[in-house]
Image (cartoon, helix red, strand yellow):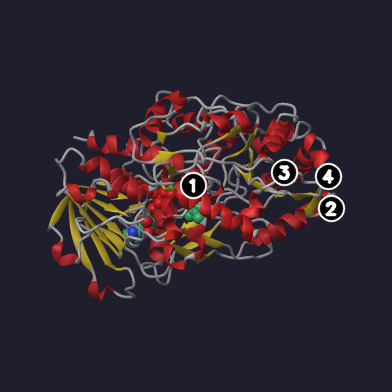
Amino acid sequence: YNPTTRSISHSTILPGTHDLLPEYDYVVIGGGTSGLTVADRLTENGKYSVLVLERGVFQNTTSVTLVAGGFWGLIDPTLTFNISSAPQEGLNNRRISVIGGILLGGSSGVNGMQVVRGQKEDYDRWGAYFGNKSDWSWDGLLPYFRKAWNFHPPRPELVDQFGIKYDSQYWGNTSHIHASFPTFSWPVLEIEMAAFGDIPGVKYPSDSGAGETGAYWHPASVDPATVLRSFARPGHWDEVEHKRSNYHTLTGQKVLNIKFQGRRARDVVFVPASATDRSRAYSVRAKKEVILAAGSIHTPQILQASGIGPEKLLRDAGIAPVVDAPGVGSNFQDQPFTVAPSFNFSSFPYHPDFYDLLLNQTFIAEAQAQFDIDRTGPMSIASGNCGSWIPLQVVTPRLWSAIAKRYEEQDPAAYLPKGTHKTVVAGYKAQQKALVKSMRSKDSAALNFFLRGGYEEGSIVYLHPTSRGTVHVNRTDPFFSPPVVDYRALSNPTDLEVLLEFTPFTRKYFLETRLKSLDPIELAPGADVTAPEDIEAWLRSVMVPSSFHPIGTAAMLPQSLGGVVDQNLLVYGVEGLSVVDASIMPDLPGSYTQQTVYAVAEKAADLIKSRR
Ligand SMILES: Cc1cc2nc3c(=O)[nH]c(=O)nc-3n(C[C@H](O)[C@H](O)[C@H](O)COP(=O)(O)OP(=O)(O)OC[C@H]3O[C@@H](n4cnc5c(N)ncnc54)[C@H](O)[C@@H]3O)c2cc1C
């Protein structure tokens, strides 16, 4: 039994550019999470020819497929890009590693496999930027969440042991992208999950996909038949691509830019991924549409390199503007991590635990033996399946109202980069209004605490930061150098105000709930760090402004609000060019991003097919 082996001898990964057709109906830039989803849907009726151009290659090593513990992709540098961010003034000038997948399957091939959906209000907010009738809403996206995911309920014994709640009505069962639960979980999670209920205001929704706040169990992107990572390549490519003569893939190619005929996107220019100049540049024509799916870091780079971006930036970089699009690369957001204390339980009767799988060689050998027999046990757990998604009112019953009010009263331009275009400021003003509403809502989460199931815990994510960063081409080398990524972490003072409240909340969770029976000891910043200025100093020294969830750099917003794409995901000001990846999200869902990326891509495919 060797489930990792699958012949690709019948695939149409093209050996080289000489095998390309002169033109395709659609050229998809980026064979990642969204790109492969859209390409699968566009080729399924056989009417359209599609070429996917992917910078990475087909990779099926255990760093990609292995479930146990999650995050194996991060130890293999051939699977990811790693750009050093601009120094972060708010973080003592530290530079941050900007990481994403570069392989066929993109970031879905290296992510932590946690499958989490945002709250209803997150998706309603997106449509509301366009007025009240938009189908970019919870109701409008729910059918696409169902289409995107094949849900496998947890085993009855796990449901009994941990009181897992789930409701299959929020899920589908036709996709080749699987959402499933491990066959075993760490005993301590029972008390850790129950402890959230000791905090006033924390609910337990009927399902992780119900669009509600609270504490819940959620699935992982794991194929339960093989207990291997389920991601865009096996789900939307392995199963289908070699059977469809209209579906071509060329890997190891880096797209530099798109060329226009008048205002119409026509040709996509690319070079081998390792090239440092244009001597081996090649171009391919799109008859109907060029579809950008290069992810939130590289989609804005390609747009700007193609002449679609802030005019001054383009001129500084020597790029002839096609459209002055101030929003391209602005509005950059990610979810800060390492933002609250971590604790160690000094009385710990729960065995085994997560750390056994990391450190206890006897336990690891036993777990491996069990997994080898029938692919069950601890090695079926990815990076975690439960946690809580907590509204600001519950995080800080004392200060939420004052924080929201102060944020509401801010001048929207005050904390954006100097010289930000007025449409981008107007867009931020609209977001500010919407985010104030979610700060005041019991149905929108500000803090996420994800549990690992060990004697040490403290994985806390800030879901809706108010600071906005930028992703811009390198002005001296726009095509071959990585883009300049600036999180502008903590540039908006509201973020610090909110984050300072995460520390007392986390202390309350460990010290004032049933968890106190486990004698928790604070590891960092330490129980003696209580003054706000000391917590602030600690935050600035340890916070990472990313949980690998970048979004927003080609935002779907009205053009008057600095939008880059409209509700049909078409780029403003040109024809035949769309964006379908995480960069179109105008602001973050109160969750991690992969579940939403797949749903957006499913919707994108329908929108593209419905164009006349
Ligand atoms: C380490 C890590 C852990 C994560 N953990 C989780 C998690 O547990 N749960 C969760 O919900 N989300 C998680 N995410 C986030 C989630 O995986 C992403 O939001 C999602 O996969 C992004 O999809 P995308 O289509 O926008 O981009 P991607 O999937 O990144 O696809 C972009 C593709 O474009 C290609 N590309 C880029 N530039 C070019 C170019 N110039 N020419 C050609 N191709 C190009 C890239 O190689 C890549 O394949 C994680 C992400 C990472 C990186």
Q: Amino acid at mark 1?
A: Met
Residue 571 in the image: state x and y as whole percent: 32, 45
Q: Amino acid at mark 2?
A: Val
Mark 4 crowd level (few <14, some 14–19, many ≥20, 10 Å Cα): some
Question: Is 242 placed above or below 89 here?
Answer: above
Q: CA distance from mark 4 to mark 2?
A: 19 Å
Per the image, the residue denoted by label 4 is 519
Q: The residue tagged with tag 1: helix, strand or loop? A: loop
Q: Earlier in the sequence, mark 3 or mark 1?
A: 1
- Seen at 76% across and 49% down, the residue is 343
Q: Earlier in the sequence, mark 1 or mark 2?
A: 1
Q: Is residue 576 left or right of residue 333?
A: left
Residue 349 picture quarter: top right
Badge 1 residue CB within 8 Å of ligand 1: yes
Q: CA distance from mark 4 to mark 3?
A: 13 Å
Q: CA distance from mark 3 to mark 2?
A: 29 Å
Indicate which label's residue lies in the foreground, 4 or 3. Answer: 3
Mark 1 crowd level (few <14, some 14–19, many ≥20, 10 Å Cα): many
Q: Earlier in the sequence, mark 4 or mark 2?
A: 4
Per the image, the residue denoted by label 2 is 529
Q: Amino acid at mark 3?
A: Tyr
Q: Is mark 1 in CB contact (under 8 Å) with mark 4?
A: no
Per the image, the residue denoted by label 3 is 350
Residue 166 in the image: state x and y as whole percent: 52, 27
